[in-house]
Amino acid sequence: MAMVGITSCRKIEDYRQSVLHVGGEARLLDPSMSVDEALQGVEGLLLTGGEDVEPALYHEEPHPQLGEVDRARDAFEVGLVGRARAQGLPILAICRGLQILNVACGGSLIQDIPSLVAGALEHRLAVPPHQSFDLAHEIWMESDSLLARLMKERVPDGDVCQVNSRHHQAVKDVAAGFKVSATAPDGVIEAIEDPAARFCLGVQWHPEMLTHRPDQAGLFTHLIGAARARPGLALAA
Ligand code: MN
């Protein structure tokens, strides 16, 4: 088994089930824990969706369309990212998770896509609860990325696929050392990864709502696989 630490959020059950479904174990991590306590025994980190990231963390003033922020959660997750990366833990970051990963590593965010990106697609698609896997737009994957390799292993038909979309923020400046692994047709960044890490991937869409699709479930399968295969466990202790 591989123990995956999942950051607390309002829709935790979708994330938890996605990990359990592919044979992982799940531990919920919340800001009442210290970073040390939270990561004790954890072999992989899943950063989940939720509130906007406090813009002061990337040296910007709040935009009028900034949504709810949770500074305690931000601080906790910045700490988790730093420690997890230092320990070589595999990281899968989803939606806000991608955004906090980018900010924790020195990048910045577009605070509100509709007001700041001319000609942007609809990225905050409201869908009725019974249609939770409705799709919103294409993503174009970089063919030499970890993301494309993982997805094509399951769906070998090119570097394009359809995803859902429930965000109004996106990556602006990509953190140093990271690269863009997918964009939407309007140029909005939809995935980033750290090519120097064994598995450190952030996606802007919600694969935890698309696990009926092999390519999307595969992201969780590979997180578990990377957690099990983590080298240098003794070094990280
Ligand atoms: Mn999107």
Image (cartoon, rainbow, N blue to C red):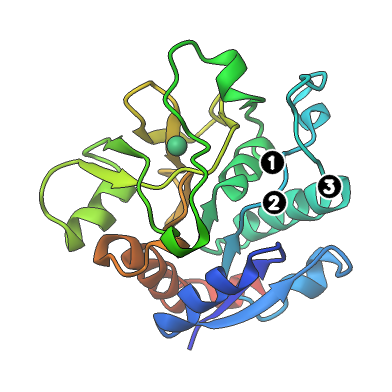
Q: Callout 2, which amino acid?
A: Gly
Q: Callout 3, which amino acid?
A: Asp
Crowd class of label 2 (few under 14; some 14 to 19; many from 20; radius 10 Å):
some
Q: Which residue is mark 1?
A: 104
What's the distance in space between the residues labelled 2 and 3, CA to CA?
Answer: 19 Å
Q: Position of residue 25 (x, y in %)?
A: 55, 84
Whether tag 3 and tag 1 are in contact, CB under 8 A, the answer is no
Q: Position of residue 214 (x, y in %)?
A: 25, 67
Depth check, mark 2 against mark 1: the one in front is 1
Depth check, mark 3 against mark 1: the one in front is 3
Q: Position of residue 16 (x, y in %)?
A: 56, 75
Q: Which mark is residue 134?
A: none
Q: Secondary structure at mark 2?
A: helix
Depth check, mark 2 against mark 3: the one in front is 3
Looking at this view, is 1 or 236 the one in front? 1
Q: What quarter of the picture does the C terminus occupy?
A: bottom right
Q: Secondary structure at mark 3?
A: loop
Q: Which residue shows up at 37% across the image and 21% down it?
A: 186
Q: Which mark is residue 70?
A: 3
User: In which quadrant of this rendering is ligand 1 seen?
Assistant: top left
Is 116 displayed left or right of 75 in the figure? left
Whether tag 2 and tag 1 are in contact, CB under 8 A, the answer is yes
Q: Secondary structure at mark 1?
A: helix
Q: Which mark is residue 82?
A: 2
Q: Is mark 2 within 8 Å of ligand 1?
A: no
